[in-house]
Amino acid sequence: MTTTTSPQGRTELLRPDGSPVRVLVVDDEQSITELLSMALRYEGWRIRSAGDGQGAVRAAREFRPDAVVLDMMLPDMDGLAVLGRLRRELPDVPVLFLTAKDAVEDRIAGLTAGGDDYVTKPFSLEEVVARLRGLIRRSGAADRRSEPVLVVGDLTLDEDCHEVARGGDHIHLTATEFELLRFLMRNPRRVLSKAQILDRVWSYDFGGQANVVELYISYLRRKIDAGREPMIHTRRGAGYLIKPAVS
Amino acid sequence: MTTTTSPQGRTELLRPDGSPVRVLVVDDEQSITELLSMALRYEGWRIRSAGDGQGAVRAAREFRPDAVVLDMMLPDMDGLAVLGRLRRELPDVPVLFLTAKDAVEDRIAGLTAGGDDYVTKPFSLEEVVARLRGLIRRSGAADRRSEPVLVVGDLTLDEDCHEVARGGDHIHLTATEFELLRFLMRNPRRVLSKAQILDRVWSYDFGGQANVVELYISYLRRKIDAGREPMIHTRRGAGYLIKPAVS
DNA sequence: CGCGTTTCTCAGGGAATTCACAGACTTGCG
DNA sequence: CGCAAGTCTGTGAATTCCCTGAGAAACGCG
């Protein structure tokens, strides 16, 4: 796969032949498949969705996806059975498991040994997209040149090892801070509204106050902009944006 | 999509084949659909409107719009249900949600996640048009060349990062000032009456004095024309216009 | 289980923004 | 020249928006 720059200025993954990456989404809750389809389409990927094991296998056969998002709780088949059938259709395709938080983690842990990955419900879209990008990038067909490091000015964020540094100084971020910064850095120089940020960085069932965003922006500023030329800017009444400090 | 310049000097979005962009407007208040239809037609777009979920789905099927404006409060169906049905008809079409101001915190969750956007009622037409243009521009079908930067003389306005500069000097504007300037710059060399400006830049339920326009023009002049060749001109008894300073 | 870390709510304070009002000024015209 | 309509802008009040400290609750790890 190679990367190109979309009209939005974001980089998207492509297959070696230049066609878009194909992702199959399998979940029985339609609201989830819709949410995921929408978000993944926006990444520039081609999406097919299925609501049960039967449909998943059928879709796998004819759609030939490059990656699969698979809920482990399906109505008609055991998750493992579905996985087995999928594997027979698509031996080398990476799978991102969706699982309930309290589900037996060791069983999943065993499954991910082959290079697959998983996220727990309720997830944030940034998380799903990031893991999927990682899986696709690392899967055999992926172009190795596609970079896992985001750079804006002297600020760098490594999606692989979850490390952030500004001007050489390493910066420790919590999980939420990291995701927020990643979202900002994947959309440099663009104003992002608090609603957009909330929808993307917080999990889909978050029902809290929108001012967590303000709070976490404030945390990020303390760690990233402290004593330096600020990179995170407020556009009053519109949102926030990150851009290189031109000074 | 490509951009062309109309005889009046405005740039409009077009589809790749040169036909006008199609937008579906869904709202149960007829006054709103009429207001929006009128404003969006003026952008050179082809408009269809629907007053309920049923009609929206039907219209989506046969009209095949490039974007949808969707009120989340419809009489016959839940907004999310309508959204789901629309998504099945038009998987890749961006949606601009209309929502009551106090409902924002409620359940916008996930709505803007796919690159969609929303505005709160009461909205200003400039806001709706601008967001819609943004959505259409960023949607897959958009022409890569369509620029998010307005230029008049040495004055530039970037709609993505909400930045304005004249002759290289960065200028800070408030939200209202920004929208007013955007409206002026999208209609360069054309006289805009105070009534037009009020209808376009202020929200449709604004009940104040008409001289806010004068006030904000005065603010803009202080920031943009201060100590330079003026670009904002008064046509006494007619309105205002912006044009490059020829000096 | 216990402790440190992380996430999030709440509320106060401060600053920016919006807008009304009123008086000064400008322009066109009789 | 003087008037009237139209326009400009200083002042100030109300409001909105944003930032951040403090602390409660949830989490994670040994």
Image (cartoon, coloured by chain):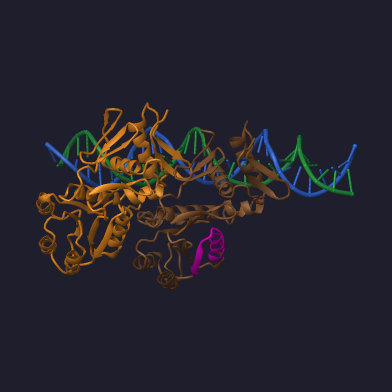
Chain colours: A orange, B brown, C green, D blue
- What residue lies at 54% left-to-right and 44% top-to-bottom? B178
Position of the N terminus of chain B by quadrant? bottom left
Q: Residue at x 54, y 62 (%)?
A: B41
| Above/below status of B7 relative to B223 | below
Quadrant position of the C terminus of chain B in the picture: top right
Q: Is residue A82 left or right of residue B162?
A: left
Seen at 54% across and 34% down, the residue is: B167
Q: Quadrant of residue A24?
A: bottom left
Q: Position of residue A100 (x, y in %)?
A: 20, 56
Q: Position of residue B42 (x, y in %)?
A: 56, 59
Above or below residue C11? Residue A129 is below
Left or right: residue A228 compared with residue B172 = left
Q: In the shown orientation, is residue B232 left or right of residue A68?
A: right
Q: Residue at x 15, y 50 (%)?
A: A140
Q: Position of residue A147 (x, y in %)?
A: 24, 41
Q: Is residue B49 magenta?
A: yes
Task: Examine the image and state in which quarter residue B220 appears.
Answer: top right
Residue C17 versus residue A155: which sits nearer the camera? A155
Instruction: Give the residues drawn in magenta, as a range.
Output: B32-50
Asked if the stretch drawn in magenta spans residue A143, the answer is no
Judge whether residue B39 can be spotted in this image: yes
